[in-house]
Amino acid sequence: MRFVLGIGLALMLVLTTASRAGAHPHVWVTVETTLLFDTQKAVTGLKQRWTFDEMYSVYSLEGLDKNHDGVFDASSLKALAEENMTSLKDYKYFTEITVDGLALELAPPVEYSAERDAKKILHLTFTLPLKTPLTARQRELKVQVYDPEFYIALVFAEGKAIQLPAAAAAICKTSLEAPTGDATTAKTWGAAYAATAIVACGQ
């Protein structure tokens, strides 16, 4: 339950102790996102890779190396990923996809995994399908990944905020809109500091 404890503790503190006026991040996550399409060029979901900060990576993995050899077995990492997906379910995985101002409904995550790299950094990879595929032609999609209360800072990776498969790249263009930083106009504290990845598709 180590990973759930970490995320769960962060969320609990957000809901019970952090005021909007004093909210600031305690965990940092770099997010890489790939928009997924089917053969008909309809959007079917998105794949994300989260890279956690060094301190949180150490904390989350503490106690999982049973024989202290620096190697984390596949079963432990699988459990870590499963528990993380469970803990984030009620928060919609901090992910929002909108079209014309309306949020698209996401299905439960699939193909999720956790890994520790050579620098001892924790990565979480998962796919969030759309409940209903969306025709991309003549559409503009907006993707935000954020903790509403800004206890966890999720930032798009430079140059990898939103990636497209080759077939979709032929009809869609991507851009990144900087956060406003204005909590008085944003719907939540975290949204004020969330960048927006935009995918505009033509014919």
Image (spheres, rainbow, N blue to C red):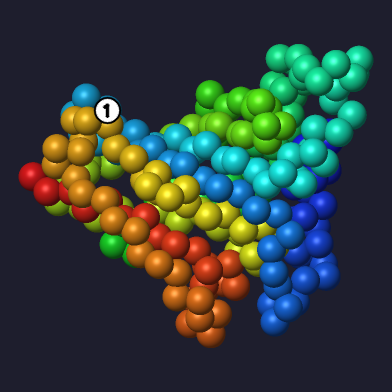
Left/right placement of residue 126 relative to residue 5 reads: left
- The quarter of the displayed image where residue 115 is located: top right
Residue at position x 64%, y 65% in the image: 150
Say if residue 88 shows up in the picture: no
Say if residue 170 shows up in the picture: yes
Residue at position x 35%, y 64% in the image: 177
The residue singled out by tag 1 in the image is: 38
Above or below, 13 relative to 81:
below
Amino acid at dot 1 = Asp
Residue at position x 73%, y 78% in the image: 22
Above or below, 154 relative to 189:
above
Left/right placement of residue 111 relative to residue 5 reads: left
Question: In x, y percent, where is residue 35?
Answer: 35, 39
Q: Nearer the viewer, residue 14 or 59?
A: 59
Question: In x, y percent, where is residue 161?
Answer: 40, 48
**Residue farthest left in this picture:** 203
Quadrant housing the C terminus = top left
